[in-house]
């Protein structure tokens, strides 16, 4: 046992909740933002503002055309895996080998790709670290072992993890069959939670074609998480945290949620309030691209998607104009209500002793 402990220490393999549940998760969120989310933002800007360079095909691979944003989105698996490997202090040969591992696990995981990448990349990283520099042919052994373990686990685990993630989507579809009030609560909470978890809420919404009132509730839930965390953690994270969470991703708080799950109470309760308000009071609909339903305020893609739906509605004759009530609903649901309700609910949690100073501090 002592020899094993000494070996793990020498290889910097630390089997702990902090290393995997905080460090790896936090890094994966950054990798996801720098690929899938940024790619979606770039595509949205190109489409809405008619930027020719951003909408033109810049590469064609195996018959598939890619824009600038499309290339960034396609690299989400490798970006997440490398980010995880970086957080786990992988040596160069292991880190670079994770590119293939991330691509495989994300592709095979479907909508649950990010979840598959998290599990597979962690194991592949640690196995790669274990064999790194242990042989005289390290340049062959380390990449071979890392990629073999990673791709093998991807083929074995990723589809199942993807199906598990899609069960969240099944719940969302079930919720859309209910009356608007309950549907608003369920969809808002479920998609909002998926946004913060290492699951691609945008991919789930896109796969399910989640639009209409259900899409509006999804936007409400995502905004409750992003704006909620951004505003209530402002005393600890200041302007950098406000921007990175408010127009970036609330997944940055996942490590802190693992340490203290009670910091998640306020955003979840807020989403349960704003969801039915979106569906029953403001009739907020997502008639733009379904992927926008799972983006929230990330690059304002959710709001741009709603606006795009309004414009399309006028063009096809399904609506006559964009009203003041439309704008009021979008602004209140997306920004004002989460910014007000979430800190107030969190204040109650602080008084109960459930949340303390520093619990939402981003590293």
Image (cartoon, rainbow, N blue to C red):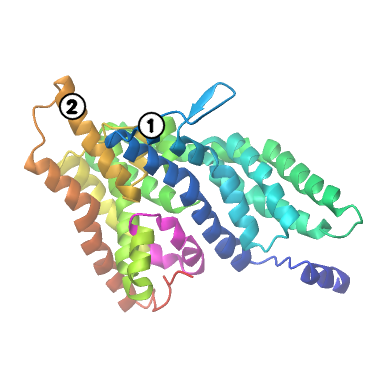
Residue receiving disc 2 = 313
Q: Is residue 330 above or below residue 205?
A: below
Q: Position of residue 266 (x, y in %)?
A: 32, 63
User: Which element type, helix, strand or loop, lies under badge 2?
Assistant: helix
User: Could you say which is closer to the camera, residue 119 or residue 145?
Assistant: 145
- Is 252 magenta? The answer is yes
- Magenta: main secondary structure equals helix
Q: Position of residue 99 (x, y in %)?
A: 65, 45
Taking 33 as reference, is 181 left or right? Answer: left
The quadrant where residue 301 appears: top left
Q: Between label 1 and label 2, give the one nearer the viewer.
A: 1
User: Could you say which is closer to the camera, residue 151 or residue 52?
Assistant: 52
Q: Is residue 49 above or below residue 12?
A: above
- Is 58 magenta? The answer is no
Q: Residues within 10 Å of mark 1 (few under 14, many from 20)?
A: many
Residue 216 visible to an observer of this rendering:
no
Q: Position of residue 56 (x, y in %)?
A: 41, 29
User: Which element type, helix, strand or loop, lies under badge 1?
Assistant: helix
The quadrant where residue 161 appears: top right
Residue receiving disc 1 = 55
Mark 1 or mark 2, which has the lower sequence index?
Answer: 1
Taking 110 as reference, is 320 left or right? Answer: left
Residues in magenta? 246-264
The residue depicted at 74 percent of the width and 68 percent of the height is: 12
User: Could you say which is closer to the camera, residue 179 or residue 260?
Assistant: 260
Outermost residue to the front:
53
């Amino acid at each position: 046992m002592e020899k094993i402990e000494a070996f793990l220490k020498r290889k910097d393999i630390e089997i702990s909740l902090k290393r995997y549940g905080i460090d790896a998760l936090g890094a994966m969120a950054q990798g996801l933002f720098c690929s899938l989310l940024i790619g979606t933002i770039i595509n949205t800007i190109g489409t809405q503002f008619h930027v020719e360079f951003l909408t033109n095909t810049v590469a064609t691979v195996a018959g598939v055309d890619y824009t600038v944003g499309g290339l960034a989105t396609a690299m989400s698996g490798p970006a997440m895996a490398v980010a995880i490997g970086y957080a786990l202090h992988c040596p160069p040969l292991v880190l670079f080998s994770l590119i293939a591992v991330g691509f495989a696990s994300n592709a095979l995981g479907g909508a649950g790709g990010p979840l598959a990448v998290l599990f597979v990349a962690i194991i592949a990283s640690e196995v790669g670290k274990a064999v790194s520099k242990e042989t005289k042919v390290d340049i062959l052994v380390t990449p071979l072992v890392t990629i073999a373990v990673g791709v093998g686990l991807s083929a074995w685990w990723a589809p199942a993890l993807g199906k598990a993630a899609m069960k969240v989507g099944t719940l969302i579809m079930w919720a859309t069959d209910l009356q608007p009030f309950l549907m608003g609560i369920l969809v808002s909470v479920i998609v909002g939670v998926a946004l913060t978890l290492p699951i691609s809420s945008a991919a789930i919404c896109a796969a399910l074609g989640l639009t209409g009132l259900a899409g509006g509730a999804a936007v409400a839930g995502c905004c409750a998480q992003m704006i909620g965390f951004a505003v209530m953690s402002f005393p600890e994270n200041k302007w950098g945290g406000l921007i990175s969470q408010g127009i970036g991703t609330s997944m940055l708080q996942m490590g802190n949620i693992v340490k203290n799950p009670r910091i998640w109470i306020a955003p979840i309760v807020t989403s349960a309030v704003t969801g039915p308000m979106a569906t029953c009071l403001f009739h907020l609909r997502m008639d733009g691209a379904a992927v926008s339903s799972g983006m929230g305020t990330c690059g304002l893609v959710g709001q741009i998607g709603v606006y795009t739906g309004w414009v399309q509605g006028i063009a096809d004759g399904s609506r006559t104009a964009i009203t003041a009530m439309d704008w009021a609903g979008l602004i209140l649901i997306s920004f004002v209500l989460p910014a007000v309700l979430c800190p107030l609910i969190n204040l109650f949690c602080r008084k109960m002793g459930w949340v303390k100073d520093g619990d939402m501090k981003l590293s």
